[in-house]
Image (tube, grey):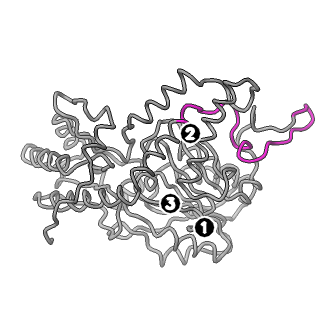
Amino acid sequence: METTSKPIQFDVSSIRRQFPLLAETMNGKPLVFLDSAASSQKPQVVLEKIDYYYRHLHANVHRGVYRLSQEATDAYEHGRKVARRFLNAAKEEEIIFVRGTTEAINLVADTYGRKYLNPGDEVIVSGLEHHSNIVPWQLACSHYSAKLRVIPVLDNGTLDLDAFRKLLNDRTKMVAVAHVSNTLGTINPIKEIITLAHDKDIPVMVDGAQAAPHATIDVQALDVDFYAFSGHKVYGPTGIGILYGKQKWLSELPPYQGGGEMIAQVTFDHTTFAELPHKFEAGTPNIAGAVGLGAALEFVMETGRETIASHEAGLLSYATEQLLAIPGLRIYGTAPDKASVISFLLNNVHPYDTGTILDQLGIAVRTGHHCTQPLMDRFGIPGTVRASFGVYNTTEDIDQLVAGVRKAASMLQ
């Protein structure tokens, strides 16, 4: 492999100072946090916005004529406005607050299934999917006697698009794919997938949980029908996320849950439902989560998504070079277009053993199947060690990782 120079650092030290938890220690060592694909750390601005909301603004939203409720509503709806800009959605009505990507996919699978799935119909997913983009569709297919079809994964971790073309047919009612693989880092050719599906009038749902922290997403340019991401992976709080849906689809789908907020008028004989987006936001929402998510997305946009992507691409290149220099180390997922995720194994060493030694050194990585058990079966392995990078990571973090893996190799092999 050609020698790769270290990435040009933007002011990452300034970025790191905005994340209080990165100053903590783990097992008596400075924390090296390399698990952002599971959940990212939170910048001070997000923590402060959430704290300010609870201290000074808290009231229920959309329901009070008093000033405090109106201010809380404004803060909550500001989060929606920011999410619309973040995705370049056409309208705020196309932005639905959910608990996260998992709930977004369940919402679409349930409501779309109720309206459109019939016996013999088919739903296509890919072999790269997180369980949360497999199980909801399995449940829908099981309930309506439809079939789940799978796009195969090639040896380098990319999707077999020729096989995908052959899967598309008149029975296909939905294509649901990840924008970025959480395990391999593969960036799927989403635009091409959407175009192929739309040529046959098939809608597409994209799991964007792993793309949102790393890439500029334009749902109008993609022409995607549904797009989902989680706040906690993009430097925001847990328990909040976004479902984008084209207005025509969201208007046609039935409500996901019933309760307050999602109604227009209720009698014991009949209920009419609220307009978008409130039709899909039953009950008191995660107001503080929406406030925090808005702050997180503003942080990302102000930092600059192209800047973040460039920084992380440099980290990925450097880490790949350094890790492959370790004898017996194998990287899974060698797609030419990748996000900042590396999954690897040391010879026949179980990933948990490698992860345990790294933990003792203060290095936080993810080990296991990463909620992609079918993908692990595809490669015939029990799991991997996964290092994933965020805006706050440095080449020094990677140097610590490499030294830790070398130590694990000397102890375990």
In this picture, is 361 found above or below 194?
above
Residue 396: x and y, percent?
A: 17, 47
Which residue is denoted by mark 1 in the rendering?
A: 223
Residues shaded magenta: 266-291
Q: Is residue 247 magenta?
A: no
Image position, residue 327 (x, y; %): 10, 59
Residue 202, how many percent across, how many down?
65, 69
Q: Amino acid at mark 1?
A: Asp
Q: Which amino acid type is marked by label 3?
A: Ile
Question: Image height check: is 202 above or below 23?
Answer: below
Residue drawn at 46 percent across, 40 percent down: 236
Dot 1, how many residues are within 10 Å of its Cα: few (below 14), some (14-19), or many (20+)? some
Question: What secondary structure is marked by label 3?
Answer: loop
Residue 307: x and y, percent? 35, 58
The residue carrying mark 2 is 99
Who comes first in sequence, dot 1 or dot 2? 2
Which residue position is annotated with label 3?
A: 217
